[in-house]
Amino acid sequence: MLSIRHLVRLHLGPIDLEIASGECVALRGRSGSGKSLFLRAIADLDPAGGDIALDGTGRNTMTAPDWRRQVGYLPAETGWWGDRVGAHFANWSACRPMVERLGLDPAAVDWSVARLSSGERQRLGFVRLLENRPHCLLLDEPTASLDEVATEVIEELVAEHCAAGGCCLFVTHDTAQFIRVARRGFLLDAGKLVPDGGT
């Protein structure tokens, strides 16, 4: 379970939220409402007040890299530090089934990052995130650049992650997706979370 208590960051908060193991929670809000800011604060990428814990272990009891291995954040635009795709994966062979499932060419391991389309970057970023086997996924519009087929696969993989005991906070602007991916959702409005049924 991911537990957030009194999170405060810039114009956000205080925010309280619990996401149970096996649960995906959807989040939406207008542009600029702070959705990405909220995810970055949870991932310990930006300083924030409050207490955050995963399965009872506080974020402040471990290093930021160790925390982010367990609470994995996928930004709307993934970052790439090496010239080649393969430089960003520890075990491409293990990732290959997921790569193929997402409609990507396994030969992409040898590609230059510069040749990737936005959709390819988004899908590979998702694979890279899952390679680390985080318990909690923080997904910032993970299907924004994807077609319907790839979107469906991403949603299936998130559902499988949760079915295996993981949890997820899924940001989306798509009302239909908001309803599909989660039984519980929130609207981020004026820095606060408001329960939202997605209609």
Image (tube, rainbow, N blue to C red):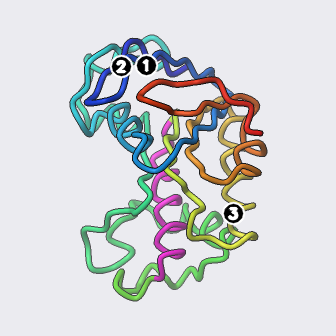
The residue positioned 55% from the left and 63% from the top of the image is 95
Element under disc 1: strand
Q: Amino acid at mark 3?
A: Thr
Amino acid under label 2?
Leu
Q: Which residues are magenta?
A: 117-134
Work out whether 18 lies above or below 145. above
Q: Nearer the viewer, mark 1 or mark 3?
A: 1
Q: Are marks 1 and 2 in contact (CB under 8 Å)?
A: yes
Q: Which mark is residue 15?
A: 1
Work out whether residue 145 or residue 127 is closer to the camera in this orientation and state it. Answer: 145
Tell us which disc is closer to us: 3 or 2: 2
Give above or below for 15 relative to 176.
Answer: above
| Element type where label 3 sits in the image | helix
* Residue picked out by circle 2: 7
**SS category of the residue bearing label 2:** strand
| Dot label at residue 151 | 3
Whole-Å distance between the Cαs marked 1 and 2? Answer: 5 Å
